[in-house]
Amino acid sequence: MKKRVCCLALLAGLLAGQAGAWYYDLPSEWARDEVRAAEDSALVPNELTVGYSLGMPFYTTKGGGITRYAFSEMLGRLIALSQKTDPGTLAARQREAGKTASFSDYAPDDAVFLACAFGLVEGQPGGAFQPGGALTREQAAKILTLAAEAVQPGTYQAGGDAPLALADADAVSPWARGYVAYALQSGLMKGVGEGRFDPQGGLTIEQGTVLAYRLADRLGLSGVVPAGANSWMWEYGLDRTYFAAHEDAYGVCYTGSKGGPIKRVEVTEAQVNGLPASIAPADGYQFPGALNVGAALVHEPLKVGKMYEFSLKLKLYPAGGGDPIEVDDQFTYLCGKYCTYPDDNYY
């Protein structure tokens, strides 16, 4: 069993490998607002935020596409978010209710288990899950559609041969026609140009992340941060890391590139679920390739399975001097087992 970390100094060392990654591997410009919002809405695992074009085992296929594991992970998190709990708590409930997910090549973690338990994804012929396998666009359309139906029953009406006004409609598999029609009509997915859907084409990690976020946003789930709300982070070359310091305090660290435009970040006010929370500074951590420019502890008892919506007011101090820049920061925290976010790899 992993031990709870109650010391920020130790945690700093564990986070060092991730802290500066954004400055080397940003998402494409078209995707940044929605990718940032997906992260801040608790849909994206920390391992994935390290990079959106870098090859990452289990998240990126050899061809550069999003894997079955990664997309299932995000949609499982979406299911948990829809029920205002964390994947571990909801997965335990599903297992107690008799749901199972057994594969010959992979033992699902909690979020992927939820995607299986709610019928969004299935195993492959022969009983394998193939977590590192690629997803086609029509398969993604099916998963998105079934997730929408799982969260809001009646959203999708199965049956019939859905009409598809596509130049490549004949390339859509018969089983996928209804799902593709829903994904297009709902605006979750778009064509690839010239009236084509490219049903057998793949998805990049950032495309899959954007699709998961769009579905959560369209479903109006509580805790989903609006796209663009935290785009100031890109503008000032900053990123945020958050973690449970101990049962009564939640740590928030802001990192920036060495020599970047911001030399210090100060948290001046904090609210948790709309209520004021006390804050205390927690400065002084250096990371390879990045500089911790500010940190704070928000004192709020954390409860496993509870969703927290954080709203912070910050002052950004320019490296070249001048008046501080005031910005608002908001994000959602789903408190899982051991009070980690979004999984226990920090511990």
Image: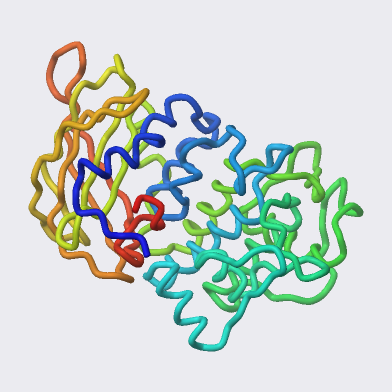
Residue 13 location, x and y as percent? 30, 38
Query: Which quarter of the figure has residue 196?
Result: top right
Residue 308 appears at what percent x and percent y?
27, 61
Q: Is there any visible trace of residue 236 in the rendered image?
A: no
Q: Is residue 242 above or below residue 163?
A: above
Residue found at the far top of this picture: 320
**Residue at the image point whose x is 19% and y is 48% from the top:** 7
Left or right placement of residue 246 versus residue 114 in this view: left
Left or right side of 14 for 29: right
Residue 98 on image: x %, y %: 56, 88
The picture quadrant where one finds residue 52 is top right
Q: Residue at x 27, y 58 (%)?
A: 309
Question: Looking at this rendering, what residue extends furthest in the bottom direction?
Answer: 97
Q: Nearer the viewer, residue 58 or 236?
A: 58
73 in relation to 13, above or below:
below
**Residue lying at 66% horizontally and 50% vertically, measured from the top left:** 67
The answer to whether 216 is drawn above or below residue 87 in the figure is: above
Quadrant where the image shows the N terminus: bottom left
The residue closer to the viewer here, 107 or 168, is 107
Residue closer to the observer: 328 or 243: 243
Residue 284 in view in this figure: yes
Colour scheme of this structure image? Answer: rainbow
Counting the numbered discs, the total is 0
Q: Position of residue 330 (x, y in %)?
A: 28, 47
What residue is shown at x 76% (from left), y 56% (from top)?
Answer: 138
